[in-house]
Image: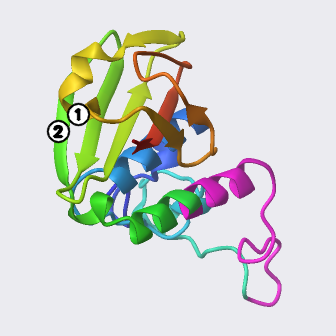
Amino acid sequence: FLDNHDVSRFYSVIGEDFAKYKMGIAWLLTYRGIPQLYYGTEVLMKNFSNPDGKVREDFPGGWAGDKENFFTSRTGDRAAAFEYVSKLANYRKTHPVLHAGKLMHFIPQDGVYTYFRYNDAGESVMVMMNAGKDEKTVDMARFAERLRGFTSGVEVTTGATISDLKSVKIPAKTAWVVELKR
């Protein structure tokens, strides 16, 4: 989990940095184990756990007199966050490689962390995260063991095609979840 009722909310802890938020959500929904989302994380609810009640505030909406209703009306980054979580959570739900597949991760290099989720059925998802402030060019040869037989990939959240698996340029503060294609 990234947060729960006993700790400060994730979005507040990362300084309300939306790029970091997306990297955290990508990790949570693609790594091993059963992900746990605390209510409101999907719509950028924030606060610190001093006192605990601050992170246990009601979810806005559904009650007469609520000023906002995040069940039916989300705008800006709240809408983008909800859409991002929805895409990745639904992808995870419909792709067993993420909830039952194997994991192989590589030592981060130049601020880029890469891991693969794969299974015996030949499915493979590459997750690449650039936590740095600059775009990075990644020589994909170091991942040859996991890329063997794949020729391209589709980034799950944007639909963008990655047609060259020899070298990629990953933007700063970005997480890619790439379904690899043969």
Quadrant into which the C terminus falls: top left
Mark 1 closeness class: few <14, some 14–19, many ≥20 residues within 10 Å: some
Question: From which residue to which does the magenta span run?
Answer: 63-86
Tally the numbered discs: 2
Residue plotted at (46% across, 9% down): 137
**Contact (Cβ within 8 Å) of mark 1 with mark 2:** yes
The amino acid sitting under disc 1 is Arg
Identify the element where label 2 is drawn: strand
Q: Nearer the viewer, residue 75 or 27?
A: 27
Whether residue 66 is in magenta: the answer is yes
Q: Is residue 57 visible?
A: yes
Residue plotted at (56% across, 19% down): 171
Whether residue 107 is in magenta: the answer is no
Which of labels 1 and 2 is toward the front? Answer: 1
Q: Nearer the viewer, residue 180 or 158?
A: 180
Q: Position of residue 156 (x, y in %)?
A: 53, 48
Q: Which residue is mark 2?
A: 104
Vertical arrangement, residue 103 with respect to residue 65, above or below = above
Residue plotted at (60% across, 38% down): 18
Which label belongs to residue 146?
Answer: 1
Identify the element where label 1 is drawn: helix
The amino acid sitting under disc 2 is Met
Vertical arrangement, residue 165 with respect to residue 34, above or below = above
